[in-house]
Amino acid sequence: MRRTRSTDSPAEQHAAILKAAVEEIELVGLGRANLDVVARSAGVSRSTLYRRFPNRDALLTAVGRWTFETAMQGLSTITVGAEPQDAAVAAFVEGLRLLTTMPVLREFLQFDAGAIVVRTGTAGDVGDVLAIAARALADGLRSAGAQMPAEELLAVAELHIRLACSVAQVPTAVLDVDDPDAVRAYARRHLAPLVR
């Protein structure tokens, strides 16, 4: 749907463009996202879009960053007030939910030749993205009271992140990702014991 021409501030235009880009990516995919459609949907001219984002890659990188940051903010609140093992379970359940229900997040994280790759410069390469996510989860688990050494906690957090990404991308008969109770039981049995 086309919005009327925007008279919003630059920050509001920036946000409208990001929102329109997310909607376009969810509708047609990352590779087919059309900047003319994004500009029309955001209610800005193409030249305004290019003033805010100098090229397609800059816009997609901004969308990738926004998506990643949104997901990380959602995960950061999950561990508040929980015991370490409960926090690990809740984080895995929420992380898998985000990975399976946010189409734009799925667009940015894809399997390619057996490895997860980030399809834009979201936070650098995939190692950077995993490291940021693992650090955030480790910090949340530490806040929840995890007592294990820092390097072990970080390794466990990265394992949680990698497993969630893998299960979200590759269907498995072992776990129904659409059943939150099954995901919770799986995390409680297999992942929670790793956190102490």
Image (spheres, rainbow, N blue to C red):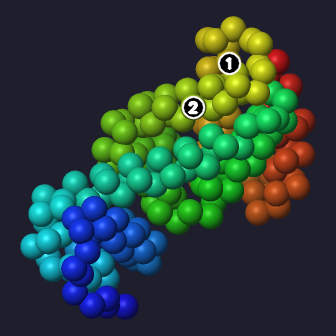
Q: Secondary structure at mark 2?
A: helix
- The answer to which image quadrant residue 32 occupies is bottom left
Residue drawn at 70 percent across, 25 percent down: 143
Residue 1 seen from this side: yes
Residue drawn at 77 percent across, 19 percent down: 146
Along the line of sight, which residue is nearer the eye, 3 or 56?
Answer: 3
Q: Position of residue 126 (x, y in %)?
A: 42, 37
Residue drawn at 24 percent across, 81 percent down: 6
Up-down relation of residue 191 to residue 11 (above or below): above
Q: Is residue 185 left or right of residue 105?
A: right
Residue that carries the numbered disc 1 in the rendered image: 153
- Label located before the other in sequence (2 or 1): 2
Viewer-nearest of discs 2 and 1: 2
Q: Amino acid at mark 1?
A: Leu
Q: Is residue 119 left or right of residue 52?
A: right
Up-down relation of residue 109 to residue 135 (above or below): below
Q: Position of residue 171 (x, y in %)?
A: 68, 56
Question: Residue 114, labelled with which disc?
Answer: none
Residue that carries the numbered disc 2 in the rendered image: 136
Q: Position of residue 77 (x, y in %)?
A: 67, 43
Q: Is residue 7 left or right of residue 110?
A: left
Q: Tell me the quadrant of the picture where the N terminus can be found.
A: bottom left
Along the line of sight, which residue is nearer the eye, 151 or 8?
Answer: 8
Q: Tell me the quadrant of the picture where the C terminus can be found.
A: top right
- The answer to which image quadrant residue 75 occupies is top right
Q: Amino acid at mark 2?
A: Ala
Answer few, some or many: residues within 10 Å of disc 2's Cα (few below 14, many 20 plus, some between 14 and 19). Answer: some
Between marks 2 and 1, how big is the CA–CA gap?
A: 11 Å
Q: Position of residue 90 (x, y in %)?
A: 78, 43
Residue 173 seen from this side: no
